[in-house]
């Protein structure tokens, strides 16, 4: 079998499951990330091992496994990251959160950054790639996630520090950070019906779900940490649930933060909030 034949075969087999557009996108990722073949390039004959691998990959995709876990690669803000089922697959909305931070802090700025609940390390790695002079830290409860993040840092040759820690119990050195950022768990179990089956079945629930009775649990803790760990005038950036972003905004306002605003993502959903620790008089 040749690479162009395999491209057509995978797209054809996935179309009933994903639809034509998504099937084509998933096929492209598989062919580029696994077989090093980009459509329009010269086709080549697959080895026997590659043919066997292609059937294994197709079976996994047909069972609903996300393509990023199948290939082991996720694209994020110009970086190629390793991902496993121990970490969330980085989303475009999180790229927008990174973009917001970079808009606020130009290239000549020098910042110390803490990412709480770092997962694959996508946020601090993307920031470090664009702002090499920044000092970036990523913290996560999962030892497996930290291992993935460290591997990404090594692979990308980006000196970011990663450490295990529980956001709900973590203590951070006071007045240390210019920027704190988090994409915390924020989905109550009652919203499972709104979610894709592939996310529910394959991505880590620890990074997704928050207790039904306390959906703002992590935001309250982030407000407590930021109130002391941010330098005066430093800013906290959070990704939010589109259904309660206004509640998060009010929480930060009531906690005494300045200039609390929220922002829509490219889908026009309220998905991000920024809050600043009050500057010293």
Image (spheres, grey):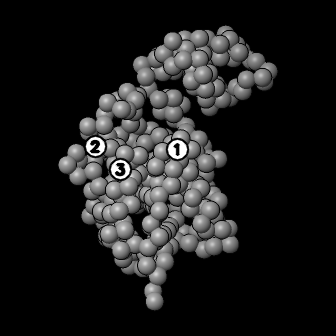
Residue closest to the far left: 213
Marks 1 and 3, how far apart in space?
15 Å
- Residue 186, image x, y percentages: 34, 48
Residue at position x 42%, y 19% in the image: 63
Residue at position x 46%, y 49% in the image: 270
Residue 254 in view? yes
- Indicate whether 56 appears above or below 73: above
- Residue 162, image x, y percentages: 45, 60
Q: Which residue is mark 1?
A: 268
- Sequence order check: which comes first, mark 1 or mark 3? 3
- Sequence order check: which comes first, mark 3 or mark 2? 2
Left or right: 238 in relation to 210 = right
- Residue 212, image x, y percentages: 22, 45
- Sequence order check: which comes first, mark 2 or mark 1? 2
Residue at position x 78%, y 23% in the image: 40
Q: Which residue is mark 2?
A: 188
Residue 166 in view? no
Q: Which residue is mark 3?
A: 244
Marks 3 and 2, how far apart in space?
11 Å
Marks 2 and 1, how far apart in space?
22 Å
């Amino acid at each position: 079998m040749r690479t162009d034949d395999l491209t057509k075969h995978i797209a054809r087999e996935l179309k009933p499951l994903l639809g034509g557009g998504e099937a084509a996108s998933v096929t492209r990722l598989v062919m580029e990330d696994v077989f090093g073949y980009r459509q329009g390039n010269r086709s080549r004959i697959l080895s026997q091992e590659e043919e066997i691998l292609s059937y294994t990959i197709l079976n996994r995709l047909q069972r609903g496994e996300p393509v990023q876990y199948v290939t082991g690669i996720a694209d994020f803000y110009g970086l190629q990251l390793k991902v496993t089922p121990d970490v969330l697959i980085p989303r475009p909305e999180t790229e927008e959160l990174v973009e917001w931070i970079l808009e606020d802090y130009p290239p000549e700025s020098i910042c110390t950054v803490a990412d709480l609940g770092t997962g694959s390390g996508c946020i601090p790695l993307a920031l470090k790639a664009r702002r090499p002079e920044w000092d970036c830290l990523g913290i996560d409860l999962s030892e497996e996630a930290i291992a993935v993040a460290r591997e990404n840092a090594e692979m990308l040759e980006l000196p970011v520090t990663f450490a295990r820690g529980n956001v709900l119990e973590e203590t951070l050195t006071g007045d240390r950070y210019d920027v704190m950022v988090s994409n915390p768990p924020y989905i109550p179990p009652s919203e499972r019906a709104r979610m894709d089956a592939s996310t529910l079945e394959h991505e880590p629930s620890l990074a997704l779900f928050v207790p039904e009775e306390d959906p703002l649990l992590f935001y309250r803790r982030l407000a407590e940490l930021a109130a002391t760990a941010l330098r005066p005038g430093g800013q906290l950036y959070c990704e939010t649930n589109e259904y309660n972003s206004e509640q998060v905004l009010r929480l930060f306002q009531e906690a005494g933060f300045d200039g609390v605003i929220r922002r829509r993502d490219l889908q026009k959903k309220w998905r991000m909030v920024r809050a600043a620790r009050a500057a010293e008089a």
